[in-house]
Image (cartoon, rainbow, N blue to C red):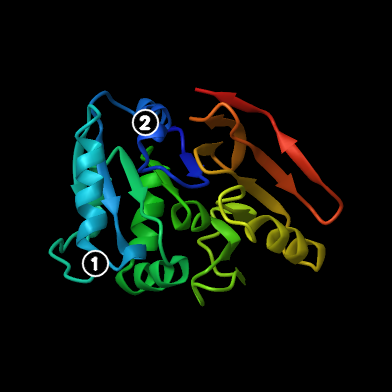
Amino acid sequence: MPTQRIIACGGGLFDQSAAPLREFILGRARQANPRVCFLPTATGDHPEAIARFYRVAAQHECRPSDLPLFHREVADLAAFLAKQDVVWVAGGNTANALAIWRVHGVDRVLREAWEQGAVMTGASAGMNCWFEASVTDSFSMNELAALNDGLGWLAGSACPHYDAEEMRRPTYRELVANGFPSGVAADDGVGLVYEGKNLVEAVSARPDGRAFRVSAEAEAAIEVRVL
């Protein structure tokens, strides 16, 4: 059976400092020189986000492509995604990305690709989407809120940007204390590595990157391996 991997990153995956984390992700693919598809839906398929992906991909040994849905050109999504070794979900508006994926059936074909061994990854919205719930600014850029409508491949909730945005940590802690699903949080530059539905390790491109399990009772540090 193929190994089903999700590497959910707290943020900063485009940054130059995140190169070791990107190399780690590519190294988990099922073949060398992997096919990497950028899914920019959460940015509204913004051209600069797509261009930035190609600039970053050029620094690594991989075969990049992108899959826009606002001006969709790929008719057979299942066949296209089945060829990919890594699917990189862009940061941006988590709620909008989920809604658009569902309209196009991308949620279903993404799961098929994952079950066949493609690595799923991304930061921010690209972390949030895999979980049942998450903390997001999808509904207002000025206020964080709970989102209870994730893909649900991974149990519980997620909170990216744990160190990078001042209100992420207190908002998540308060939500969980008031009944929001327990879950995991990650600093920028940190990746949470899941095999199947199990968290097997946390890795960081930064020497000080952190990750946590967060419940109503406590915030417990997850051991992080520096890359």
Instruction: Name the residue at 63% across, 36% down.
Output: 210
Q: Is residue 170 left or right of residue 79?
A: right
Q: Is residue 100 above or below residue 67?
A: below
* Relative depth, front residue between 170 and 114: 170
Q: Amino acid at mark 2?
A: Ala
Instruction: Name the residue at 63% across, 57% down.
Output: 166
Name the spot of residue 178 as percent of width and height, x first.
80, 68
Where residue 19 is drawn, which disc sits there? 2
Helix, strand or loop at mark 2:
helix
Please say if the residues under marks 2 and 1 sit with CB atoms less than 8 Å apart.
Answer: no
Residue 67 showing in the rendered view? no
Specify few, some or many for label 1: CA neighbours under 10 Å numbering under 14, 14-19, or 20 or more: some
* Relative depth, front residue between 193 and 208: 208
Instruction: Name the residue at 19% across, 46% down.
Output: 65
Name the spot of residue 157 as percent of width and height, x first.
64, 57
How far apart, in angstroms, are the residues tagged by discs 2 and 1?
27 Å
Residue pointed to by mark 1: 69
Name the spot of residue 200 as percent of width and height, x first.
60, 31
Residue 27 showing in the rendered view? yes
Q: Residue furthest right?
A: 217
Number of on-image labels = 2
Helix, strand or loop at mark 1:
loop
Q: Amino acid at mark 1?
A: Leu
Where residue 174 is drawn, which disc sits there? none
Instruction: Name the residue at 46% across, 38% down.
Output: 4
From the image, state whether disc 2 or disc 1 is nearer to you. 2
Q: Is residue 61 above or below residue 46?
A: above
* Relative depth, front residue between 133 and 20: 20
